[in-house]
Image: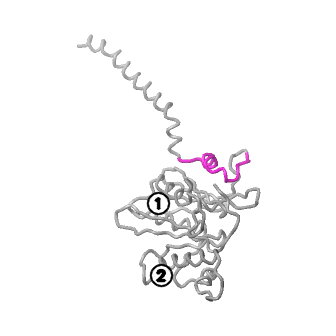
Amino acid sequence: MFEITLKRRPHLHFNILMKVVYALFFLVGCTGCFNQQKGESFKELLSRFPQLPRQTTKSGNNYKFIRSISNDRNVTIQLREASDSDNRIHQVITIINAQGQTAHVPLLPNPFRDYWQFQHLPNLLRSNYTFEKELKNSIEGLGLNDTTGTTGMVLEEIFLSLLRCRSIHDSDSTDLNGMLRSVYRNEDEPEDSCSIMQRKNWMHIHKVIHPSEHSFRDFTTFLDSRNNRIYQFIGIPKRHKKLVYSIKVYQPYCEIKPLIL
């Protein structure tokens, strides 16, 4: 028995050695895999969106940090911005989940209207990159569209706390006078394309926020006065199911000089 044990021990050492070699090979070979699990880097975002101002600092990020929001589900949302050569503000939302994975959602200036897909604007081109797609892909990619309502929480935090929008309710009119005037205009007044757009915008927004017709969340429509945008969240949450939703963007006041992505 003693001699047999001595003869088998070299094989035992060899097997252990091979396991160590395989383990080291796996760790070295998958270094890139762990990097990929971190999500999209800022450099990769700039590569996908050449419209964004370039990074010029040696550290790789000249975007000014604005604010950060964290919730009890260990999700952090950050806002950064930078100006381009025409002094237009470009913003970037960064979402970080509990595992440290990141995703970025650009907020391009309004002249890039194909990206925003503004409702009721004529001659919009179909684009592979839109605000709705970027936001939904980020939430899905980070695993935040769960069955416990994380998506709704993150969206409300983005619009209310991060971008500091104001929730629009049925009784609101002060900041929407332009659209309201187009709805209740004098019949003798000519209606231009801007007035038509504003009237259609308000009619569609009102359908969702009117309490007698829709019982939904407290926050569904958000006015971003600084950037002249209205975001509308449409979707009915169901218990123990992932949220199916859409996001529509409106331009409450007309702007000119559209830019193509």
Quick check: 63 above or below 191?
A: above
Q: Main secondary structure of the magenta part?
A: loop
Residue segment shown in magenta: 39-57
Does 210 appear in magenta?
A: no
In the rendered image, which quarter is residue 258 located in? bottom right
Please provide percent x and percent y for residue 107.
62, 60
In the rendered image, which quarter is residue 159 located in? bottom right
Please provide percent x and percent y for residue 204.
51, 76
Does 53 appear in magenta?
A: yes
Question: Residue 210 — which label?
Answer: 2
Cα distance between the residues tagged 1 and 2: 31 Å
Which quadrant of the rendered structure holds the C terminus? bottom right
* Element carrying mark 1: loop
User: Residue placed farthest to the left in the image?
Assistant: 1
Residues marked 1 and 2 touching at CB (< 8 Å): no
* Front-most of residues 129 and 240: 129
Quick check: 110 above or below 177?
A: above
Which quadrant of the rendered structure holds the N terminus? top left
Q: Residue at x 61, y 88 (%)?
A: 187
Q: Residue at x 49, y 34 (%)?
A: 30
Tag 2: amino acid: His
Tag 1: amino acid: Arg
* Element carrying mark 2: loop
Please provide percent x and percent y for residue 156.
51, 68
Residue 244 falls left or right of residue 247: left
Residue under pointer 1: 73
